[in-house]
Image (cartoon, coloured by chain):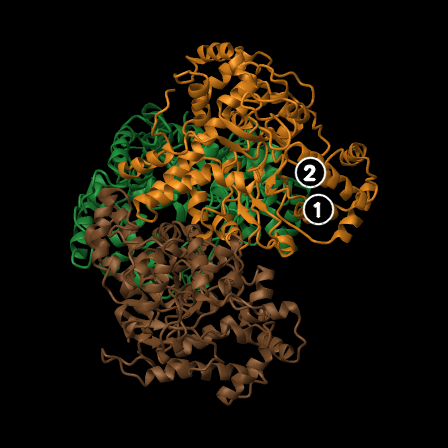
Chain colours: A orange, B green, C brown
Amino acid sequence: MALHPDRLFPADERTRAIARELHRNTADLPLVSPHGHVDPRLMSENRPFPDPARLFVVPDHYLTRMLYSQGVRPDELGVPSATGEPAEADGRTIWRRFAEHYRLFRGTPSKLWLDYTFAEVFGIYKDLGPDTADEFYDHLSARLAEPAFRPRALFDKFNIEVLATTESPVDSLEPHAALAALQGADGRKWGGKGGKVVTTFRPDNLVEPGWPGWKDRVEQLAAITGEDTATFDGFLTALRKRRQDFIAAGATCTDHGNLTAATEDDPKAAAGIYARALAGEATDDEVLRFPALMLVEFARMSVDDGLVMQLHPGANRNHNQWLYEGWGRDVGGDIPDATEYTRALKPLLDAFGNDPRFRIVLYTLDETVFSREIAPLAGGYAAVFAGAPWWFLDSPEGMRRFREAIHETAGFYNTAGFVDDTRAFCSIPARHDLARRIDASYLARLVAEHRMTDSEAAETAIDLAYHLPRKIYGLEQ
Amino acid sequence: MALHPDRLFPADERTRAIARELHRNTADLPLVSPHGHVDPRLMSENRPFPDPARLFVVPDHYLTRMLYSQGVRPDELGVPSATGEPAEADGRTIWRRFAEHYRLFRGTPSKLWLDYTFAEVFGIYKDLGPDTADEFYDHLSARLAEPAFRPRALFDKFNIEVLATTESPVDSLEPHAALAALQGADGRKWGGKGGKVVTTFRPDNLVEPGWPGWKDRVEQLAAITGEDTATFDGFLTALRKRRQDFIAAGATCTDHGNLTAATEDDPKAAAGIYARALAGEATDDEVLRFPALMLVEFARMSVDDGLVMQLHPGANRNHNQWLYEGWGRDVGGDIPDATEYTRALKPLLDAFGNDPRFRIVLYTLDETVFSREIAPLAGGYAAVFAGAPWWFLDSPEGMRRFREAIHETAGFYNTAGFVDDTRAFCSIPARHDLARRIDASYLARLVAEHRMTDSEAAETAIDLAYHLPRKIYGLEQ
Amino acid sequence: MALHPDRLFPADERTRAIARELHRNTADLPLVSPHGHVDPRLMSENRPFPDPARLFVVPDHYLTRMLYSQGVRPDELGVPSATGEPAEADGRTIWRRFAEHYRLFRGTPSKLWLDYTFAEVFGIYKDLGPDTADEFYDHLSARLAEPAFRPRALFDKFNIEVLATTESPVDSLEPHAALAALQGADGRKWGGKGGKVVTTFRPDNLVEPGWPGWKDRVEQLAAITGEDTATFDGFLTALRKRRQDFIAAGATCTDHGNLTAATEDDPKAAAGIYARALAGEATDDEVLRFPALMLVEFARMSVDDGLVMQLHPGANRNHNQWLYEGWGRDVGGDIPDATEYTRALKPLLDAFGNDPRFRIVLYTLDETVFSREIAPLAGGYAAVFAGAPWWFLDSPEGMRRFREAIHETAGFYNTAGFVDDTRAFCSIPARHDLARRIDASYLARLVAEHRMTDSEAAETAIDLAYHLPRKIYGLEQ
């Protein structure tokens, strides 16, 4: 579908004209992507992308969950089963099935992102549907075979300045090492400190003792770091050491996907639970409490080594039991929980919320906290920033509500800037385009209503799109 | 008041023009009313309506509660007391009192519905107020005496395709049987399977052991079905059998007004509580737990007999104790509770959320769950659909917020379509008119902002107004 | 900055024209300020205001908290420390520091209020920033030295009809007595019953036994009233008596800043806790329970003496521990809590919610309750009214969401009208201007969408701005 130059701008002509002008100044700024889930091997290996179905549909749970909600099973879409059941293997069949149901996405961000990608990245200016499915498939397949559509070529074409991936402490950082050894055409290193692709330290699978394989990973961490993780002190030392490896691989941030925002500052209790968990004797309550205790330990480490914390709580993981049993984690079966921040974060904020060496970015799936908790916290603690609307809220209306609910209490400069948070590499420009247009629209309304001046809005738009994420996620160096 | 043809459309001319066009295609579609509280006797007996006060004011707790909130007592409005106290008996006096306070309703849906009804149904194009109260009363009284204003004539004039009433398993289905014996002028049967008026199976008063008279109703159910309800198995068999009677009376749905959305899949526990409740020995906790257990039993029955479940939780019933003591249930004394769905529904969804034979429509009085819980559930389970904004949210702003919060995650096709949910028969066209205009307005905004195409929006508008409710509530046959 | 005459009106020209017209009728109405925190000594002593920094920046925690959230410490802004640490003393230095960070407030209500005040009150039509900081400081200092800028002169210039201050029962009412002895140029008394400045009875520090100094204050109350507060009966008698002093000082309202909205009607339990608290033996639970019990006692008193209750629950006080330890209470360290009203208020409403002698205005920091709880309560109880959006929500977007969420259920006439709730005297006209413009904008949208008529909206705008607060807060006499 051909993209309209005024897409996502308010209909009112007065406001639209302002939005258009504001957006003109941000449209070509480099993309800063401080949080996401692109596989670093994509960049280090730079192999051609697979077929269109495997590139766009199979791994994108935004898409497969919507089709599933209307009765199309994951195996019909080629999602690999967790139990060895066969799944549809033919890319074209999957693609046709997807095209047939594309109407389900009308007006949703998924469709806005895909239509942008088809048009702007792949040069297809038609509507996807049953009639055009094959044409799309052939066109996309042809493009994907070309060198200009290899990951690193697209990275540069997309004008990405920096892209953060996310790894666990026990993941290999070899792809990042390989990238660090590569020089880009622009003279910048592809990986490592200050590189184009950097990592993020995400220790979730080491702090949830109930997560299958936890003990093995704790031992793996010992092997990687040469520290004895049999004691809690050794565990902390190993984590600290591993963070240095991540920093060497370009990390400026950590990320924490705790079930809740609970925090507790009690190293002794943490040590006790750690010992009991290793011995297989921790209670269910202790297993849930350990991540809350560890969050404060990680904050303590951040004060020392400067990594910016990101907190992503509130996803009720694998809520759809049938999906989980059949297809495993991260296939679209998560549902948000109501999430409390104010009381939950107090122990962490008592300890570090006013420390100039510390910074934490708060995300939420529960938009009721935007005005009630996140804005007051971000506007009341030097260390706290409001993260971009996450996941179910990373949409035009979600982003608009985020600005409307946050801005008047916390201003613009306590928000951390857009993160695309995606594993769908090709959708990155589309997501930034959408976010910049929505921010331009919000600012345009403020200008049209004489709540800001043109020049204030122009500078703010650029700050939101570029300077703020660079600064707050520590990517300026 | 004369109705403006552009009423409820956005003010922006670009968007308004699109809304106008979208609405043009849905304005004349038949009305599908899969959930409501019209008395079936109205249709089966087809008697003239009572005087205007008793038709419009006395039974409508949207109206009486607003007047009460400003100090007009229910007895002054003719609401029959629960304690035998006298109430205002003169229709004209009640009507004048109402007209005198009509300003309280400025801009509210109640006024929009009434003004539509006065104009479009009764041909009065004036503003109701103290000065015109008598004129309205006389005009309405005259119309109501005419054959063209009998219920069945209005039903056809309103272009209602199907209207679902709501009955308890121990209610008589005779009105429905009478309707099934009647042929309409259009050749369709008035009642029974596929009829113009159908019933809905609402077992609340059989699953709340704390509701006065519960044991009597359980015995009544035995008498009606010929089953022995002294045991839990017998109770379930009786309910299953009674559902067949409802299906014969046209039912395609059940409805459940549980206090919360809690569910529990444990037939043994249910049987134990049932026995203790019959013996008068159930604890308070057990009494509250029983409806949660029964919800899963009803889901199990739905898988077998195909009735679509509707869940309406979260009304804190009879909150106003003084109103309840003086005038009984359903007089406007309910207040919403915060309501959790994600964890509450997990047992039911674990059991049937992915079963292609099962369907459940979720309603809420707590709009914070639209984006946080209902949209992700409807967009993540094949069996789940988002019900129309209910009660305090069945308003222009409520419907707009519903679309804005639900659509981007669940799309349009996981929403179940509008239900008028009314006992005020004459307001049905007004309510559908309002809902269609708000949906047209939302779609128009998406078109104006280039988030959907004209043709996508046109088809979607028709689907929302007509095809979706027919399909999802099982009314296509 | 020069103020645009259309500021805060919707951009759409059709709607803007209506808003402009609606606002024209309310712009010059007297300001009614039934709830705020201006120091009555300001009026009784009528001394010149201090320097611009001490007038605008130092005491306004909206401003200092935003600067603090970006790393500017309170002492750098001259906020007096609680521990005796030195703070910046030079007004001009503080002012420059503030001006340097003024960009943080872009588009926020704080900036809208300040810009209005600079322009409309002080006649400065420039943008505040590092370049103009000194010019502003000099200009403001010069004005503040003039007699026309003394508090009472400004009061009249601002066209304030009545201003309520807030005092504790153990605060001195002498400033109010002094005001009662003063005749205004308009012939009205400055203080006392029906005066221009009235007090409000706020007993928080007498009903929270955990608040340091509670016992001393209880004894102080005995000394002031001549009652024996050693018993609960005596305590209640003393409070009742003290309310008469407040009524004589013009009070028409009480105000209650309880931690939650919990209420309990159990005088015996209250008496027991009171005795144990005096003996230093109350448990933590009892300490928390006492304010809930007292709320019903205060309601009982209101039924007798006619004072209108205001309830402001849900502020998690002094959340920022570092700020609290360094600079004490009320310096911007509070964060809202999720707050439940429906169940919490039931005991109070069971007792008095339907009593024509009783009135309670509900405020909230948790906007999720607007549509779910406050609107249904205000629209369902004769005694309940919805208070204006409070604190973090006293902003253009917050006020818009308040109307959108409340109006359709409770109408306009169950809302109590705007309160500025400020200690920043010079900002009062700015705050009323903003509120009136936002209400005009909301009404204009309803008119533009043909949901209200012009004349309905015109009358409603005036009612909201003037008649409703006078009536509901008892200020008509």
- In the rendering, at what x and y percent does residue A64 appear? 54, 25
- Label 1: which secondary element: helix
Quadrant location of the C terminus of chain C in the rendered image: bottom left
* Chain ID of residue with mark 1: A
Q: Quadrant of residue C55?
A: bottom left
Residue density around tag 2, few if under 14, some if 14–19, many if 20 or more, within 10 Å: many
Residue type, label 2: Pro
Query: Please, is residue A434 above or below residue A382 in the view?
Result: above
* Chain ID of residue with mark 2: A
Does residue A269 appear left or right of residue B62 in this picture? right
Residue type, label 1: Met
- In the rendering, at what x and y percent does residue B280 appear? 63, 55
The residue at the point 77 percent across, 39 percent down is: A238
The mark nearer the N terminus, 1 or 2, is 2
- In the rendering, at what x and y percent does residue A350 appear? 63, 57
- In the rendering, at what x and y percent does residue A449 appear? 30, 47
The residue at the point 79 percent across, 49 percent down is: A271
- Label 2: which secondary element: loop
Does residue A277 appear left or right of residue A7 in this picture? right
**In this orientation, does residue B107 appear?**
no
The residue at the point 33 percent across, 62 percent down is: C417
Q: Which mark is residue A284?
A: none
- Asked whether the residues under the numbered discs 1 and 2 touch, taking CB atoms below 8 Å apart as contact, a structural biologist would say yes
Counting every numbered tag in the picture gives 2
**Which residue is tagged 2?**
A203
Q: Which mark is residue A294?
A: 1
Between the C-alphas of marks 1 and 2, the distance is: 10 Å
Q: Quadrant of residue A228?
A: top right
